[in-house]
Image (cartoon, rainbow, N blue to C red):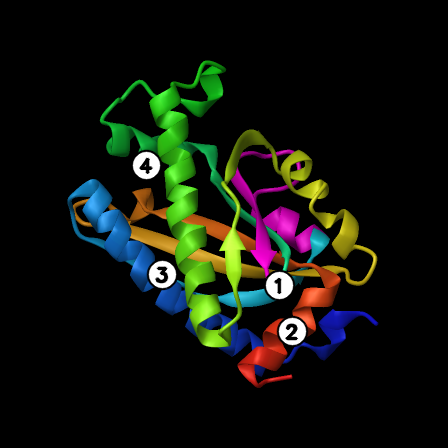
């Protein structure tokens, strides 16, 4: 059965609430990491088609910085966090205090790559921790993998299993607002949440909204 037909606005509202709680936790962790005030918001959670997902990330041929991890435990699935490579460059330059850092040079410094993975670890870990608290399910992220490539190349392999049962994915918009940084330079990325087929019902059953 195609599970997207069973998802209602109430399901998405619950996921947005969980996203906001996770964002608050992530903001605290990032504030400590950067030693400055960080605010995070989840402006929107929605279900979109695979094609629309690619468009949200700038189109299948746009080069992005992507963090990929598996979800393990009582539920399983895949999670991606993608943001335009220029936004990733600006954020990591501030984080490692290296104005020459550039994901597109082909020789990314180890400290810069580690900083990007840590960003993905904090964001995904905070969201999954909030989801675990709400559902009381054991949910663990694997160590995140970093890739700088075209959107289509990064995400397509994560769609193989999901495409058998659905044409849609859950998108969690995320905005990171740094103190003293112009709004246009804020990090605005997307989480793509792809629960494995057998896990989707378990999540909403645990939330009491099945």
Depth-wise, is mark 4 or mark 2 nearer the camera?
2
Depth-wise, is mark 2 or mark 3 nearer the camera?
2
Horizontally, residue 64 falls left or right of residue 22, namely: right
Q: Quadrant of the N terminus?
A: bottom right
Residue at 47 percent of width and 67 percent of height: 132
- The magenta segment is 51-74
CA gap, disc 2 to disc 3?
Answer: 23 Å
Q: Which residue is mark 2?
A: 202
Q: Earlier in the sequence, mark 4 or mark 2?
A: 4
Q: Which percent across, then down, holds residue 197?
A: 74, 63
Q: Which residue is mark 3?
A: 23
Q: Earlier in the sequence, mark 1 or mark 3?
A: 3
In the rendered view, tell whether residue 39 sits above or below residue 88: below
Q: Earlier in the sequence, mark 1 or mark 4?
A: 1
Q: Which percent across, then down, holds residue 204?
A: 61, 77
CA gap, disc 1 to disc 3?
Answer: 21 Å
Q: Earlier in the sequence, mark 2 or mark 1?
A: 1
SS of the residue at dot 1? loop
Q: Which residue is mark 1?
A: 75
Q: Which mark is residue 170?
A: none
Q: Are marks 1 and 4 in contact (CB under 8 Å)?
A: no
CA gap, disc 4 to disc 2?
Answer: 36 Å
Depth-wise, is mark 1 or mark 4 nearer the camera?
1
């Amino acid at each position: 059965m195609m599970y997207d037909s069973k998802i209602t606005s109430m399901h998405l509202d619950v996921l947005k609430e969980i996203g906001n709680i996770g964002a608050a936790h992530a903001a605290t962790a990032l504030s400590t990491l950067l030693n400055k005030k960080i605010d995070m918001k989840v402006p929107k959670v929605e279900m979109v088609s695979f094609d629309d997902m690619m468009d949200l990330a700038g189109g299948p041929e746009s080069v992005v910085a992507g963090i990929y991890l598996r979800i393990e435990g009582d539920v399983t699935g895949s999670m991606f966090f993608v943001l335009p490579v220029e936004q990733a460059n600006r954020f990591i330059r501030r984080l490692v205090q290296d104005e020459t850092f550039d994901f597109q040079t082909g020789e990314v410094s180890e400290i810069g790559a580690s900083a990007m993975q840590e960003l993905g670890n904090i964001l995904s870990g905070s969201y999954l921790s909030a989801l675990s608290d709400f559902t009381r399910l054991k949910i663990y992220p694997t160590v995140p993998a970093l890739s700088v490539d075209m959107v289509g190349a990064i995400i397509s392999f994560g769609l193989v299993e999901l495409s058998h049962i659905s044409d849609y994915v859950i998108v969690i918009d995320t905005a990171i607002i740094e103190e003293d940084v112009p709004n246009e330079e804020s990090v605005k990325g997307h989480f793509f949440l792809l629960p494995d087929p057998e896990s989707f019902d378990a999540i909403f059953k645990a939330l009491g909204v099945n």
